[in-house]
Amino acid sequence: MRPHDALRDPFRPGKAISPNDKYASLVAAAGYLPLVLRGEDCLELLPVAWRAINDYGIRIGHRTYDAPELGPWRRQHSGHAAKRSLWEVHYDPYDLSRVFVRTTGGWITATWGHLPLVNAPFADFTWDHARRLAAAAGLDDANEAAVARVLDALLTRAEHGPDLRSARVIARARAAAALPAPAAAPETENTPAPEPAPEPSAEMVPFGIFDAHAEAERWI
């Protein structure tokens, strides 16, 4: 990360530092506590898009997501005035089959409406490539059903075909889909850990008395 003016060291106010340098200095001063991420923590780290919840669901990247649980929140204001009362939607760029909507009642998972037309997971770059292929074929690249059919053909196409660019996109999509999904950490009871058994004490060997004159005689 590059240095920028928003970060300054109090001991060097005239020098801009990078976020990595600032983080390193804070860790050196205060230390850090490593924590295991739970399922909800992983959702918090995903990219965010602010969208309205309409009668048909949520639109992101020319895709429509919906879930029955969104019913009470349709055409409602989120309460985030700074975001024009839109809703906070988290999404995984390597798996666009679903999105996660934060509501006052908790997280809601909304699924892409045309997912049954596609037989494999897909990433954002796979979707963009399918839209380009659809446009090149004279199709409407904003039509979800049309792009979904092109996407399905793209994902099921042989990797060693003549279209090398599509082959690379397929390989990237499959590699991304093969990554293990973060699992929620199991809940553990707050039971104290058993104390380790005491180790046998080692025999103490005393040091001799240092004689500076005798040591000097050895080096003459």
Image (cartoon, rainbow, N blue to C red):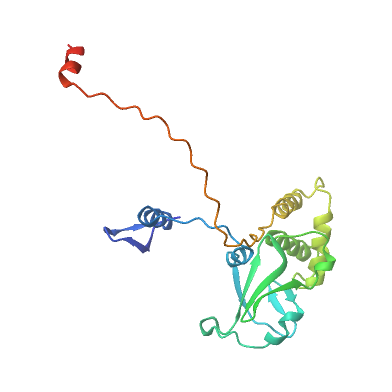
| Residue 24, horizontal then vertical, whole percent | 40, 53
Position of residue 35 in the picture relative to residue 167 (left or right): left
Position of residue 129 in the picture relative to residue 117 (left or right): left
Q: Quadrant of the N terminus?
A: bottom left
Q: Please indicate, yes or no, whether residue 128 appears anywhere in the rendered image.
A: yes
Residue depicted at 33% across the width and 61% down the height = 8
Q: Nearer the viewer, residue 145 or 132?
A: 145
Residue depicted at 69% across the width and 57% down the height = 181
Q: Nearer the viewer, residue 148 or 65?
A: 65
Quick check: 195 above or below 111?
Answer: above
Q: Residue furthest top?
A: 220
Residue depicted at 52% across the width and 49% down the height = 195
Q: Quadrant of the C terminus?
A: top left
Quick check: 58 above or below 164?
Answer: below
Quick check: 199 above or below 136?
Answer: above
Residue depicted at 52% across the width and 85% down the height = 81
| Residue 183, horizontal then vertical, whole percent | 67, 59
Q: Nearer the viewer, residue 95 or 186?
A: 186
Q: Nearer the viewer, residue 100 or 49?
A: 100
Q: Residue furthest left?
A: 213
- The part of the image, by quadrant, that contains residue 129 is bottom right
Q: How many marks?
A: 0
Quick check: 11 above or below 68?
Answer: above
| Residue 85, horizontal then vertical, whole percent | 57, 85
